[in-house]
Every structure is written in C-alpha cells, then in structure tokens.
Image (cartoon, rainbow, N blue to C red):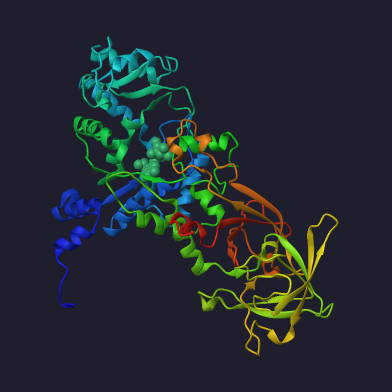
C-alpha cells in the first residue's frame, strides 16, 4: 500500500451523492451567495412514516454538512384532511428522531401573499376564473396522448377575473362553483401545465387560519412560492415532483421572485410495507390496527412504541442513501439495524413466555439465594444485578421435550442442563394432569455447580433461562409479525388481501424478572434467548406489565438469506 497516496478532489466529489455534488457545485460557484437552506415540507394529514424519515434525513443532513439552515414547513393547504394533532405529532416525531428543525413555518401563514400574487398573475393575463364543473374540467383536460381543450371561460377579461376572484374570497359562491386557474397551455405534453387550478372554494375552517378563508390554494400553487418566500436554496423532494417542476418554474419566473433549485430523489419503498398516508389512515380508520402508533405500523410513532431506537432508524435511512431511481429496500435491512443497536444498548433480563413450573426437589424449601447476572455482555459499564433463585422455578415450555429429538440439548428426562447464572439441573419426573398435559417437572440440582460450571469438568450441552416462581412478575406480551404477509402489498388491488392475519399474538401470562417492576414506559430489554421487548408506553403499569416484542434475536435475516 502506498500510504502517501492522496485522495484527489475528483474522488471526493465522486464519493458524495448526486444531491451533495450539486449543492457543493452551487456553494463553490457562489450561487445563492454560498448559502444552503433546505426544508422538510409535510402535509399535516397523518403521522410521519419511515419514507418521510428518509426525506428528512436528506434535508437535515445536507443542511448540516454545508453549515446551512434546515426548516420544517407544514404545507397545510387542505383544511379538510389536516389536523392540529398531526402537526403536533410530526413535530414530536422529528424531535425524537433527533432531526430538530431550525425553524417551524406554515404555508398557511403565506395565504395573504399567495392571494396577492394570484391577483398579480390575473393582471398579467396569466390566470382566469373558470366556471366548469370538476367533471367538465376533467373532460377538457385531455389525456396523456391527447391534448386538452380550452375552457369557454379562458378568455374572460382581466377585470372580470379580478372581480370574480374577490367575490370567491368574499364567500359569494358555494364549494366547487368556480376555480382560479393558471393560463398556460392546454396542449402541453405535461398535464401539470394544462391550466392547473390555483384556488378552489372550500367553506371549511382551517386549523391555523380559522374561518378567515373560504378559498384555499392548491398544493402546487402554494409549494414553490412557500419555498421562495423562505429563501430555500435547495428544494429537495421525491421523484414524483419532477413533472411538477416546470409548473413551479413557470410560477416563480412569471412572478419574478427568488427561485430555489429543485432536485428530486427516489422515494423509499420497503418490502412488506405500505408507505402512503392514504392507506395508513385506512388501516387506522377500519380498525385493522389500533392506531397510528400501533407497533406494526411503519410510522415513527408505531416504531417508537414497538421499541425501535431512533438511532437504528437513522442508520437505516443513512445506509439506504440518496438515489435517483426508485427501488425497493428489503425490510430485513431495517431489522438488521434494530438488532445491531439493541444488541449494544438493551439490558439483558429473564423473561419466560410460556411458563412451565420446575420443582428442584433437593433444594431446601423456603431458601432464597441471590445469583449475580451480567446486565449486558456488550457493555461492561452496565454492571450486574442479583437474581433470586429458589426451589420452584419457571422455564419456557419449549425448553423441555419429554422425548427429545436427536439434536435437542435442553431439558429432557435424565438430561442435565445449565440454568443461566445458576446451577446444573437434571429432570427426574414429569407430572401430568388428567388430560395428559405436562404441568410440572421435578428436577434435582448439583450444589457444586453454582455459577454454571462443574468442578469435575463435566459439561452440559444446553443452557436455558429461568425465573424463581415466587419472585417472578406477571406480564402480558404482545408478539408482532409483519403487518403484510405479501412482499409487495402495493401490487394488490385491495391491500387487505395482502395483510398477515397473524400479525399480532397476545401472550396473556408470561413471567418476567422482578427487576422489571421499575422499568419505565418505553424501556427496551432483551429477554435472554427470546428477543427484544419494550415496556408498552400506553397500556403498561407497574402492577400490570405489558411488553411489545420489538424484534426476535436473529432469525428473520437468516431466513431471508435462505440460510435456514
Ligand atoms: P404520502 O403518500 O405518504 O402522504 P406524501 O408525499 O403525500 O406521502 P407529504 O406529507 O407531502 O407526503 O410528504 C412530505 C415530503 O416527504 C415530500 O416532500 C415527499 O417527497 C417526502 N416523502 C413522502 N414519502 C416518501 C417516501 N416514501 N420516500 C421518500 N420521501 C418521501
Ligand atoms: Mg402529499
């Protein structure tokens, strides 16, 4: 290796994504006076999902990389679908993710300015009030292969247009009676330029503007101008806005106002996942999930409630990166980052999902010993804790087989196993009820094996987790699987057919170790050998613990790779 080899400027340039390359080019050339300002512009019509996180990470990351400004702006132009709850929710989501905006703006604060600019376009002969019904307008619009036709109202005199817009604003006309349209080109190959609507009449109260307005700007009329008002230098958005860019350019150029540079990137698509607020809201409204924060949802609130760490989400979107072509990311990649983060951070505890009673017949009744257990083998500073051991224990039912198959090295009649941090035990008796169901095991322990090692050097092939029955706490555990069984739910006409009927299984009476009595809402732990679990932030209380399964220990990645 030639250690003196310098990385050339071109190599640095090539190693950044195409958006950063464009921004670097602009700062170097002094465009926008070297300033970099980005924004994330959501509509407050739902909670944020992981696709939005990708967009936020790009906007936030680029602003930070170039010492720029990153803002949050609500494109709140549609009062019928938007709510204050979503505004507050999206702000909280961004804070939790660690993408704190420098400023929070609202497109609704620009309604007066937008109205004045609409008047200006009318005065230039570039906008008109149309009386066609929505249906007629659709028919006049043409198709991808056929040009549209001019509305009979297209050549209204300027004075009449000004008068009609003022009367629309004053509330003289009912919803849908008229719209203001830009006068561009009904034959354009780009349908967005076929005289798009700028204002529509909606007698609806706005969550911020109150009842001041009964006409509302269309998203496409508000969006580019809002960027311009704020001085956004790089207006980054997903690919579907590429065809809208010529319209945004048209408005900005006719108004002769500050012109941001728009750059499009690929949307995030993920297997087994739907990333569209329109579908997500139906999952909520139809009761298919229990809310936007249902742990099966791909929303930030859902993932958070499931126990997914913000750092894992950030690592995932970082790895997905910035691309110009849409592609679908395997959800197993997100799982990988969740496990990687939780492996480093989650304290290990004992949790028994399907308890089976074990009586250690040669252990003194009434005696309790405290055994030292490691909190996190990946993090020495996490220290140790004391686990109670006594005559009656619980183990997980699937750690016992009455007739063990060949490779089963856990507990079986006559077979010795290690209790994690405890003793070696050997099963001597299997107790069954009248129906033949195993209700209890009798075992003996070897007092010489405390801590898990035999002084005579004999080995056991299996180690299992356990709890002292008298000390264990009851817990409800909610086991989650993919919400959608189908890999590509978007390919179904009815997304309900893509659902996984077994996405939630409730275990009503699991057992967990007593140290969890104090675990606060949202705490994520590893139940040793079982996976990661999170104290539910809504339904759990110290005397009725509820855990959500965050993710299993490893299997799904292996499964996806075909290794299992
Ligand atoms: P949805 O269909 O989920 O409502 P949207 O694009 O209508 O998505 P907005 O609230 O308008 O939702 O989104 C704000 C920003 O987030 C937009 O600029 C959009 O480009 C970006 N965005 C939305 N979904 C994705 C995604 N899946 N991947 C990347 N960016 C996304
Ligand atoms: Mg939208």
Given residues 164 and 545, the one toward you in this image is 545
Camera sees residue 408: yes
Image vertical order of residue 178 relative to residue 327, above or below: above
Camera sees residue 106: no
Give coordinates of residue 208: x percent, y percent: 46, 36
Given residues 195 and 13, the one toward you in this image is 13
Give coordinates of residue 444: x percent, y percent: 77, 78
Give coordinates of residue 16: x percent, y percent: 24, 57
| 206 relative position to 411: left or right | left
Query: Which image quarter: residue 456?
Result: bottom right
Given residues 442 and 485, the one toward you in this image is 442
Given residues 133 and 289, the one toward you in this image is 289
Q: Quadrant of the N terminus?
A: bottom left
| 271 relative position to 373: left or right | left
Image vertical order of residue 180 relative to residue 226, above or below: above
> At 75% across and 80% down in the image, what residue appears?
445
Give coordinates of residue 69: x percent, y percent: 31, 53
Q: How many numbered discs sit on the rendered protein?
A: 0
Query: Which image quarter: residue 417?
Result: bottom right
Instruction: Kindly give the residue lying farthest to the bottom in the view shown.
Output: 456
Instruction: Kindly give the residue lying farthest to the front in the view shown.
Output: 406
Looking at the image, in which quadrant does ligand 1 appear? top left
> At 21% across and 19% down in the image, what residue appears?
187
Instruction: Kindly give the residue lying farthest to the top in the view shown.
Output: 152
């Amino acid at each position: 290796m030639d250690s003196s080899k310098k990385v050339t400027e071109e190599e640095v340039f090539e190693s950044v994504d195409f958006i950063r390359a464009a921004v670097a080019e602009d700062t170097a050339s002094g465009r926008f006076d070297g300033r970099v300002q980005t924004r994330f512009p959501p509509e407050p019509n739902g909670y944020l999902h992981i696709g939005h996180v990708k967009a936020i990470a790009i906007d936030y990351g680029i602003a930070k990389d170039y010492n720029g400004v990153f803002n949050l702006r609500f494109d709140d132009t549609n009062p019928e679908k938007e709510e204050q709850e979503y505004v507050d929710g999206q702000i909280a989501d961004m804070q939790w993710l660690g993408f704190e905006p420098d400023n929070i703006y609202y497109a609704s604060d620009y309604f007066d300015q937008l109205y004045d600019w609409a008047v200006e376009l009318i005065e230039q002969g570039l906008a008109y009030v149309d009386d066609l019904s929505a249906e007629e307008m659709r028919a006049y619009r043409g198709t991808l292969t056929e040009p549209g036709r001019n509305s009979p109202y297209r050549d209204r005199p300027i004075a009449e247009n000004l008068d009609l817009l003022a009367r629309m604003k004053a509330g003289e006309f009912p919803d849908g009676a008229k719209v203001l349209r830009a006068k561009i080109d009904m034959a354009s190959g780009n349908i967005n330029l076929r005289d798009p609507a700028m204002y529509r009449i909606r007698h609806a109260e706005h969550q911020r503007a109150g009842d001041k307005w009964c006409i509302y700007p269309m998203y496409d009329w508000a969006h580019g101008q809002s960027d311009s008002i704020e001085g956004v230098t790089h207006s980054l958005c997903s690919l579907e806005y590429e065809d809208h860019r010529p319209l945004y350019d048209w408005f900005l150029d006719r108004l002769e106002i500050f012109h941001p540079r728009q750059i499009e990137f690929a949307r995030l698509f993920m297997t087994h996942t739907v990333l569209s607020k329109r579908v997500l809201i139906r999952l909520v409204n139809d009761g298919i999930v229990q809310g936007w924060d249902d742990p099966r949802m791909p929303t930030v609130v859902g993932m958070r409630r499931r126990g997914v760490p913000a750092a894992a989400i950030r690592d995932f979107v970082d790895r997905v990166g910035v691309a110009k072509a849409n592609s679908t990311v395997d959800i197993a990649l997100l799982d990988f980052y969740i496990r990687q983060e939780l492996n480093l951070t989650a304290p290990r505890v004992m949790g028994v999902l399907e308890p089976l009673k074990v009586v250690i017949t040669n252990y003194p009744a009434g005696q309790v010993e405290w055994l030292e257990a490691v909190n996190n083998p990946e993090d020495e500073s996490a220290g140790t804790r004391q686990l109670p051991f006594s005559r009656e224990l619980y183990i997980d039912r699937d750690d016992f087989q009455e007739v063990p198959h060949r490779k089963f090295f856990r507990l079986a009649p006559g077979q010795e196993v290690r209790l994690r941090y405890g003793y070696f035990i050997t099963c001597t008796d299997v107790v069954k009820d009248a129906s033949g169901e195993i209700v209890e095991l009798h075992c003996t322990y070897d007092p010489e094996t405390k801590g898990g090692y035999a002084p005579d050097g004999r080995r056991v092939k299996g180690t299992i987790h356990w709890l002292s029955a008298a000390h264990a706490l009851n817990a409800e555990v909610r086991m989650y699987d993919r919400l959608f069984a189908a890999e590509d739910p978007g390919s179904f006409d009815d997304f309900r057919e893509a659902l996984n009927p077994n996405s939630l299984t409730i275990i009503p009476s699991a057992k967990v170790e007593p140290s969890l009595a104090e675990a606060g809402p949202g705490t994520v732990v590893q139940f040793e050998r079982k996976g990661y679990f999170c104290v539910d932030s809504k339904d759990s209380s110290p005397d009725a613990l509820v855990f959500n399964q965050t993710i299993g220990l490893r299997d799904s990645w292996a499964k996806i790779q075909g290794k299992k």
